[in-house]
Image (cartoon, helix red, strand yellow):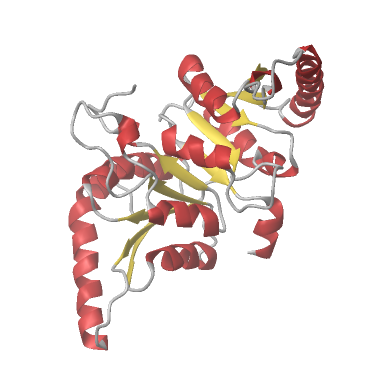
Amino acid sequence: MKIEKILWPNDLSKCSEGALPYVSSLAKKYGATVNVLYVTPDLTRHESWYGDFDSSHAQKIVEWETKKAEERMQEICEKHLSDCAAYAKHARVGDPASEILEFIREEDVDMVVMCRKGEGGHFHMGGVAQKIVSNSPVPVVITQDAEEKAGA
Amino acid sequence: MYKKILFPTCLTEFCEHIFNYVLNLAVENNAKLWIYYGLGRESLTEEELLEEIKKGEELVKSAYGKKLEEKGFENYMINVSDGDVVSEITKLARNAHVDAIVMGTGTKPPMAAGEDIRVGPLGQVTADVLLWSPCPVLIIPPAWVPGLTRR
């Protein structure tokens, strides 16, 4: 069984971090490269229903978020993935589900490991996770969040 | 990490492809494998139910027995039960302290060669197992069925 590239889509939430043990154990077992991906939602692409607006302010927020996410990903990688064969961090801007699916195809990922929900809302299953499971061309491991696991 | 694996099956052609993956995963990780086949909600007498369970076990053995033998894999158990399939799968996963459930996106994926992989939506059982599972769920896409297009 070939698992050379593992994708860990991460929104830097507590639940995303819950997938870490599964990511690192798979990476160690199969000597795979871990790709950590953070997608910043693109705030500048909204339709201007109420007239055109200057998107430079929204652009600055997106850039700031991406920069902060890169810093946090670097911390996570150094702290938790240093004993894995290799890791790479990626930051993209756009629709999270579309960007993750595009990344899978572009980078020829072998497996995706992600939590079933992110930090937005108190839902059992997040919309991004659902879209990835339904449309991914490669196997997806969906982990549950730590609080639910403790209560199970 | 994957020392106990649960494979719920509905004995379709898609499940057969998933089983190849599950078997390799179990062999490589030296894991124990549970193969679960659900009968669904049945109103049967105890004797009839026992008969159905026996039939179900035979069906699972005839579907996967040869592959298990070829791999020389003996660390497996076959479970057949009646009742709500999702409840039974999650109950088994909880009671057996399973590390991962491996299943497909649904029972009716596009199977004919040349079909688009996106035709098959997420099935209800898979969607519910994802919600109620006490452990990680590994979903195998229809794209892994040989001959299907990857658009």
Q: Position of residue B102 (x, y in %)?
A: 42, 48
Residue drawn at x 78%, y 22% is: A74
Q: Position of residue A139 (x, y in %)?
A: 44, 35
Name the image quarter holding the C terminus of chain B.
Answer: top left
Q: Quadrant of residue B14?
A: top left
Residue drawn at x 76%, y 13% is: A54
B74 above or below A42? below
B97 above or below A53? below
Q: Position of residue A21 (x, y in %)?
A: 66, 41
Horizontal side of A134 relative to A76 (left or right) equals left
Q: Please count the marks in the image.
A: 0
Residue drawn at x 44%, y 31% is: A136
Residue drawn at x 75%, y 32% is: A80
Horizontal side of A109 relative to B42 (left or right) equals right
Q: Position of residue B4 (x, y in %)?
A: 49, 54
B47 above or below B24? below
Name the image quarter holding the N terminus of chain B.
Answer: top right
Residue B30 visible in image: yes
Looking at the image, which residue sits at the far front? A51
Q: Out of B72 and B105, give the one closest to the viewer.
A: B105
Horizontal side of B36 relative to A72 (left or right) equals left
Residue B75 visible in image: no
Q: Out of A4 and A31, give the one closest to the viewer.
A: A4
A8 above or below B6? above
Q: Quadrant of residue A49?
A: top right
